Image: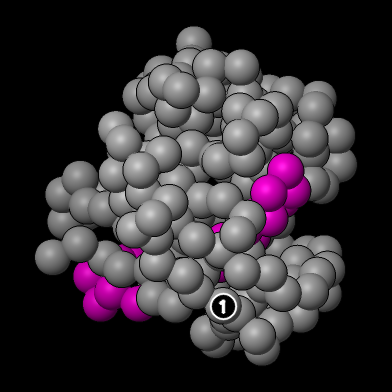
Amino acid sequence: MNPTLADQSTDDTLAGYSTVIGTIEDDEFNTGGIAWDTSKGASQTSADFHIDDLHLVQ
Amino acid sequence: MPDPPSFTTKRRSIASDGTLSWGDSETSWRDSVAQSDRVSFDTGNPRPFGDVPDDGSIESFERDTLQYYSGALDQYSISTNWSHTGTRSLKTTANTPSPIWSFPSDGLGYYPQRGDTLRYVNVFRNMNADGWQALRFTHVFEALDKDNYYLFTRRESRRLRRA
């Protein structure tokens, strides 16, 4: 069973920032690592894809 | 290593004041316009990330280094463009890169735990002029094995555009 990120949601704005937020709710998840695996897609070779500000939400 | 910031666990939803449509076909996304679903968000704050307290940062790339990461380091870089917080962000330099990762003891000040509520920010710029974005990311927790879960922003084939 993979841990899940519940209530994940995004606010997608064209040519703007998108915020992703969610809660770790899996019983087996204790302390884990972080991985970034992103793609801007082959059709978007001239585009820039950036990620920033991984944050704990209070 | 700094102490982890304190926090309380709760669910949050970020809504948009806009309407989005999307197609799920990676290879024929232009055709997906006619087949697209449409979702409207009508309950949200039009600036949803504006009220998130500016503390509890896990990774903002302001250290200007990827020394705490392993993996496909040649396919990412620290960028001085389009930073949401500070002056640095992580930039994808390959179209379909392999992941980079950091596990506890690798050097970040804090690693996610069960019950944590997290958020991060994406920005996609200079996309094709037709208005579509190849936003190929999803947001899940994946298991390498029982003891090595990690927060994983994984590719997917969703394409979004402003309706």
Q: Is residue A34 above or below residue B80?
A: below
Residue B109: image location, x then y, percent: 61, 48
Q: Which residues are magenta?
A: A12-35
On the image, numbered disc 1 is attached to which residue? B40
Q: Is B161 displayed left or right of B53 in the figure? A: left
Horizontal relation, residue A18 to residue B53: left or right: left
Determine the residue positioned at 61% across, 28% down: B128
Q: Give the structural element (helix, strand or loop) at label 1.
A: strand
In magenta stretch: residue A6: no
The one nearer the camera, B145 or B14, is: B14
Task: Tell me where residue B95 appears, x and y as whole percent.
Answer: 45, 20
Query: Tag 1: Cα neighbours inside 10 Å, few (<14), some, or many (≥20)?
Result: few
Residues B122 and B162: in front is B162
The amino acid marked with disc number 1 is Ser
Which chain does tag 1 point to? B
Q: Which of the two residues, B113 or B141, is positioned nearer the viewer here?
A: B141
Q: How far from the left and from the top, in percent, is residue B78?
A: 68, 23
Residue at figure coordinates x 20%, y 45% from the top left: B144
Q: Is residue B140 visible?
A: no
Residue at image position (76%, 80%) is: B45
Q: Residue at x 66, y 88 (%)?
A: B43
What is the quadrant of residue A4 in the picture?
bottom left
Q: Residue A40 in the image: state x and y as whole percent.
A: 49, 30
Please state which of residues B105 and A53 is positioned toward the viewer in this rendering.
A53
